[in-house]
Image (cartoon, helix red, strand yellow):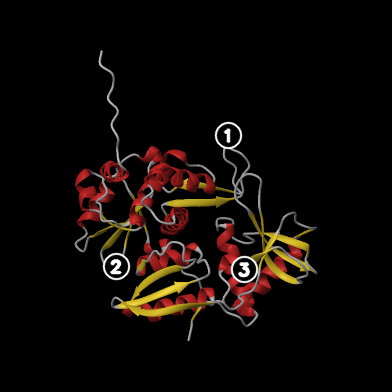
Amino acid sequence: MSKPELVSVTPPKVLQQIHADLSLPDTGDPQTLVAEVMRRIAGTMCPCPPGALRRATVSALAPLSLLDALEDQVDDTFEDLVGTGDLIELTRVLVEGGENQPSWMFCSPPSFVRRSSGRIYIIGVAPDDAVFLPSELRKTMLRSGALRYFDDPEGACAKELRGIGLRELLPEAWLVQRRPVSAEAVVTQHLHLLEKNGVPGALDKAVILGGPNAGKSYRDRWMSPTNESGHFIVRVPQLYGEPLWYLSKLDLGVVQRSLLMPAQEAKERSSDAAWRLQLALDAAAGQPNAYKLAEIDGGYLMVFSFPLPLEARRRLTIVGSRRAQPGSGTTRFWIPKNELAEEQRFLRDSYWLFAKD
């Protein structure tokens, strides 16, 4: 019997095979590739902690050595998949046979959303990443980053998707609409909940999110408390799993009382609730966060240095598209000219974000 022959395979060849296995056109878009790989891994791993899914995706792609700032790309893609609705992150849930974790990732059931423009967005991951679209539909499906969609002005595709049993979501349920509210009202409500439901006592290894000092990136705003007093978003690392997020009252650098986030909607991600509250705290203190705006490619590029909660991220991704720049510490979205005024109003009314002058 002859010995098996060892064949050397180069990273580009492996990448070519990955595209073939995923039925993914090789467009050179790393966002689309990372999204498809993460969906496949999620289909077999979920339910699992968020960090486990991100680490598994990095581990799968790292040997290729073809993607710059891989961990940043995976983190951004993770946020995209949660934002678009392919993945769901739930807090304060117990998973049978699972460890006690602050949050767990689940795959959304295969679904679709049909917009008034006729564009249909495909959402969800089947268990074990089973194929849920017929081959003819898969061939015509378009991709952009984490988005999968069809342009279907006549409605024939929607009819076929209903026929194979996909759940149809209403656009208004998918793109959550918040009522305009002042930052002061949001802060007042949370401070009331802190006094009513907060737990007294210090938090071990806590780090606090400082104010929007000029020139400081989001990552640089995190610091260990020294002699600060007031109300702060606090993050506490866990030995296993994701960190816990709190609204805390500090006196001379010592945590006095804490409210676990999310304080109101149990379905909201703790990080999203904390980010939105920090935006409110900054705005109420007269230091609203701002984004850069530049005219480009027949539209406008919005550059955010502060993380956007998934509702805002989903909306800007659907209205326009996310523009990746790994390692920049920013999140960027391109918005068509005719959509700019409406999206600026949305960011101002819901997140108290303003364009820099």
Q: Quadrant of the N terminus?
A: top left
With 38 as the anchor, is 238 left or right in this view? Answer: right
Sequence-wise first label, 3 or 1: 1
- SS at circle 2: loop
Q: Residue at x 71, y 63 (%)?
A: 224
- Look at discs 1 and 2 and give the one toward the viewer: 1
Q: Sequence order check: which comes first, mark 1 or mark 2?
A: 1
Q: Amino acid at mark 1?
A: Gly
Pointer 1 residue: 97
- CA gap between label 1 and label 2 equals 43 Å
Q: Nearer the viewer, mark 3 or mark 1?
A: 3
Q: Amino acid at mark 2?
A: Ser
Instruction: State the CA–CA distance, disc 2 to disc 3.
Output: 41 Å
Q: Residues within 10 Å of mark 2 (few under 14, many from 20)?
A: few
> In terms of image quadrants, where is residue 262?
bottom right
**Nearer to the camera, 272 or 95:** 272
Q: Could you tell me which secondary element the residue under label 1 belongs to? A: loop
Residue type at numbered disc 3: Arg
Question: What is the number of the mark on residue 199?
Answer: none
**With respect to residue 212, does 243 lie above or below?**
above
Residue indicated by mark 3: 221
Of 42 and 216, the residue lying toward us: 216
**Is residue 239 shown to the viewer in this render?**
yes
Residue drawn at x 48%, y 83% as measured from the top left: 356
Query: Residue 345 location in percent, x, y?
Result: 45, 80
Q: CA distance from mark 3 to mark 1?
A: 37 Å
- Circle 2 residue: 116
Q: Residue furthest bottom?
A: 357
Q: Residue at x 66, y 71 (%)?
A: 189
Cβ–Cβ under 8 Å for marks 3 and 1: no
User: What kind of element bears circle 3?
Assistant: helix
